[in-house]
Image (cartoon, rainbow, N blue to C red):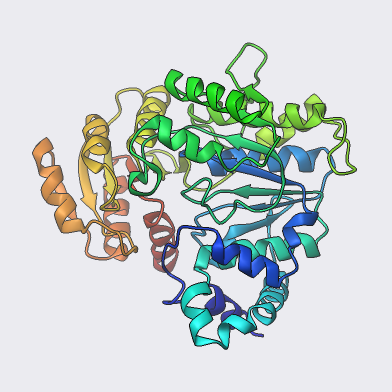
């Protein structure tokens, strides 16, 4: 199988849909003889901070000498971007091998029209299966799975987990998850396997109270993370934003809980302070308050809902005070973008609008019409090449630039930048 064929098997027009429910993923895993049953799964769920927290947990376990497979989403730089082995990207050969195994197992569905209509898995479901195959092939000590947008009905809700980690809960994807923080919290918490301990990150009082009551009723041990005096936040860490302190505290608590377990499927963890600090310091994901250039600044931050933007604004205040940025931005139409830009506009010298490459995108034209209410310059970039040209012109004039709104615009701008070099 060629690499292009393996990519096409995962990502194509037929698979590019959202399908809530676990029927398809469980059927596929059955065809594969359930690779998830042999893995020590750490689930990371929540609204914001999942990828960062999963990466910090992974890097800490790796620093302590363990072999770790990690799946994060969305896959912004191609489908192999879903996966990490010991914190590093997988090879094309590894990806092809796992896809070939899955494709062979899925043959009964591929060859049967009725089965294909009911059981044909989506891109994300296929990606989860490929990840589980890959991590089994690699004989990983731990499998860290970042949930997609959901919880109990998320495709990552497979196997008997050894720990569920819940990051910041906020209002997002309310059409699928519920329209209150309490409902969303319960949806996320319900991914935990029977008897599995749960680590809850720093959250609002109503979320913490909901988690405490839910865990009591459902017989789960709950461990609450906190930003305390004994938390350490290396000043030279790769992810510098203030909002990462919440994710650091959550990852620290998760690793501490794992290390306190007497036995995890035949493994006893020995996590010292050196491994903990090394894991936090080295953890890095692009587009999380990602300072790409200085003098003047060019910052990428994938803040894509009001809670994210609130955290971004606080980080901007800490990082550069009242500094104004020209904001290059695009957003998905189903987000609460009025609340997002109401907060963000105080840091805006002007806006450049771009349409994200996603079927749920708000058009740059519609976004520009909304942003004019803030009585600041608003422009439209017809292409990503146009956006890059404008960024370069602004910085040449000494004006700092912030790229934010949707994670989907970030790799497109970087790719256009690289093409222009």
Decide if residue 340 is on the left or right side of residue 40.
left
Of the pair 391 and 155, the residue shown nearer to us: 155
Q: Residue at position x 18%, y 51% from top?
A: 367
| Residue 331 drawn at (x, y percent) | 29, 51
Q: Name the residue: 65% across, 21% down.
A: 232
Query: Which one is nearer the viewer's eye here, 241 or 109?
Result: 109
* Left or right: residue 8 compared with residue 1: left
Residue 176 placement (x, y as % from top left): 38, 49
Residue in the picture at 51% in, 80% down: 116
Quadrant (top left/top right/bottom left/bottom right) for the C terminus: bottom left
Residue 408 lies left or right of residue 191; in this view the side is: left
Q: Nearer the viewer, residue 333 or 421?
A: 333
Image coords of residue 141 (percent x, y): 82, 49
Quadrant in the picture for residue 213: top right
In the rendered view, does 92 fall on the left or right side of 393? right
In the depicted structure, whether residue 367 falls above or below residue 89: above
């Amino acid at each position: 199988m060629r690499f292009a064929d393996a990519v096409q098997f995962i990502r194509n027009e037929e698979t590019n849909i959202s399908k809530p429910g676990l029927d398809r993923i469980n059927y596929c895993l059955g065809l594969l003889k359930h690779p998830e049953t042999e893995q020590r799964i750490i689930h990371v769920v929540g609204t914001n901070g999942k990828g960062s927290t999963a990466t910090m947990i992974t890097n800490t376990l790796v620093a302590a000498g363990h072999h770790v497979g990690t799946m994060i989403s969305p896959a912004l730089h191609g489908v192999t971007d879903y996966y990490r082995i010991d914190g590093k990207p997988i090879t094309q050969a590894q990806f092809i091998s796992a896809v070939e195994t899955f494709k062979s197992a899925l043959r009964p569905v591929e060859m049967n029209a009725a089965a294909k209509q009911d059981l044909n898995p989506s891109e994300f479901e296929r990606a989860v299966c490929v990840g589980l195959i890959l991590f089994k092939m690699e004989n990983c000590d731990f499998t860290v799975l970042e949930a997609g947008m959901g919880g109990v009905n998320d495709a990552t809700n497979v196997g008997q987990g050894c720990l569920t980690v819940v990051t910041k809960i906020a209002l997002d994807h309310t059409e699928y998850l519920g329209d209150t923080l309490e409902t969303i919290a319960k949806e996320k918490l319900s991914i935990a396997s029977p008897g599995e301990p749960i680590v809850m990150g720093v959250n609002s009082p109503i979320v913490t109270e909901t988690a405490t009551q839910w865990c009591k009723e459902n017989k789960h041990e709950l461990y609450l993370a906190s930003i305390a005096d004994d938390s350490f936040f290396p000043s030279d860490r790769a992810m510098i934003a203030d909002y990462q302190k919440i994710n650091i505290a959550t990852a620290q608590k998760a690793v501490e809980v794992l290390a306190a377990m007497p036995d995890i499927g035949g493994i006893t963890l020995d996590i010292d302070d050196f491994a903990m600090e090394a894991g936090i310091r080295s953890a890095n994901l692009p587009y999380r308050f990602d300072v790409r250039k200085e003098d003047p600044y060019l910052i990428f931050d994938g803040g894509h809902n009001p809670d994210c933007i609130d955290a971004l604004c606080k980080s901007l205040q800490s990082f550069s005070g009242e500094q104004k940025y020209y904001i290059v931005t695009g957003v998905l139409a189903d987000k609460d973008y009025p609340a997002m830009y109401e907060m963000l506009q105080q840091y805006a010298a002007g806006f450049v609008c771009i349409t994200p490459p996603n079927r749920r995108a708000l058009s740059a034209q519609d976004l520009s019409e909304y942003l004019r209410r803030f009585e600041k310059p608003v422009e439209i970039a017809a292409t990503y090449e146009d956006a890059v040209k404008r960024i370069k012109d602004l910085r040449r004039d000494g004006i700092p630039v912030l790229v934010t709104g949707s994670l989907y615009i970030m790799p497109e701008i970087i790719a256009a930048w690289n093409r222009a070099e």
